[in-house]
Amino acid sequence: MAESSPLVSGASLSYQQRFHQRWHNLRDPHVRALTWLLEAPDLLDAYAPRWGGRIAALGPLSEMDVTWLHALDGNPRLLHAQLMQQPSARLGRYAEKLMTFYLQQTQRLISHNVQVRDDANVTIGEFDFLVHDALHAGAEHWEFATKFYLLESYRVQMGANAFVGPNLADSLGAKMDKIMQQQLMLSQHPAAGRYLTQAVTHAAALVKGWLFYREQDIDTVLPPALGVAAGHCRGFWCELAELALNPEAHYLVLPRLEWLAPARAPLAQALSVTQLKEAIGLLFQQTLAPVLIAVCAVAEADGSVVLEQRRGFIVPDDWRGKAAQRVQHAIVHY
């Protein structure tokens, strides 16, 4: 494949290229997104002390899982039907539906989206997933999140709040503080018992996603204290004027619900350099939100298809300054 840039230090292939190699037969976009959720590296290090053993991991896919995914790709009718129930434009909701389908099909799911209310009918919280605990007689509570964060600026002394969401309304640090200090404590609330059919034996966060870096920082080894998994999925971010455009490459602008798995699209949908600039310019006239793009190459096995090699957020001209203010505000008030 043309144009390759390692996204993990020391790797000969990018994560995207490894995904395409392993799953080259998958065609259905929803099955590909589900496959990414199941086999992508976890965003957080389950062994990092800061998480206190409260990071869930799906583990390697079994041969049965692999066979099932290929069969599902051939006949995705049931998956499509589930996704069409109360459709949502929210990426988190889409990912949650995909994970629900998998847990149902593998008979691991006890229940999901279980709201807990107190005696005054005030909502205390919600269990994302209650799954069968494989080691103990009971239920495991999973808080599930699929997150995309941009590293505002790399510093030797930095915290998780330096990773901010594209819309600047969230940060990795704030999100994990909320999960660890509030959401994973839900089963201990006095009102929770009436909503549980089995005792919760463990509560953990299952977090997937991508982290995005300035080009000069893309291979940065993060401080272990951050608790980020070393092999997490990486991308770049920059302003449009800084983007190193390759006239021989093909580009895709990725809609939000296509942010999960590495992109695969018909060549006819790909954009040239000129078309990419025009498309991003039009989007920035409508919204000041960063735009996620995929840098693609034509598939060797099928010249009518392009495959993502790298991905990155293109940010508006004023985004960097706003991100720096957001991070500074978090530091002052932490």
Image (cartoon, rainbow, N blue to C red):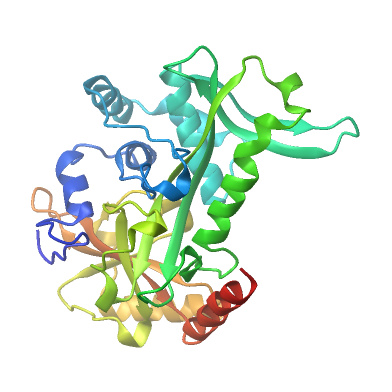
Can the viewer see residue 138 in this picture? yes
Furthest residue toward top:
137
Image: 161 above or below 206: below
Quarter of the image with the C terminus is bottom right
Q: Nearer the viewer, residue 148 or 29?
A: 148
Picture quadrant where residue 280 is located: bottom left
The percent coordinates of residue 4 (x first, y second) are 13, 64
The percent coordinates of residue 28 (x first, y second) are 33, 38
Image: 212 above or below 259: below
Furthest residue toward right:
120
Q: Nearer the viewer, residue 264 or 334?
A: 334
Quarter of the image with the N terminus is bottom left
The percent coordinates of residue 242 (x first, y second) are 31, 85
Q: Nearer the viewer, residue 177 or 101?
A: 177
- Is 46 placed left or right of 186 in the picture? left
Picture quadrant where residue 38 is located: top left
- Is 327 placed left or right of 119 in the picture? left
- Is 146 placed left or right of 5 in the picture? right
Task: Name which residue lies at 8% across and 53% down.
Answer: 300
Can the viewer see residue 114 in this picture? no
Task: Name which residue lies at 56% across and 43% down.
Answer: 93
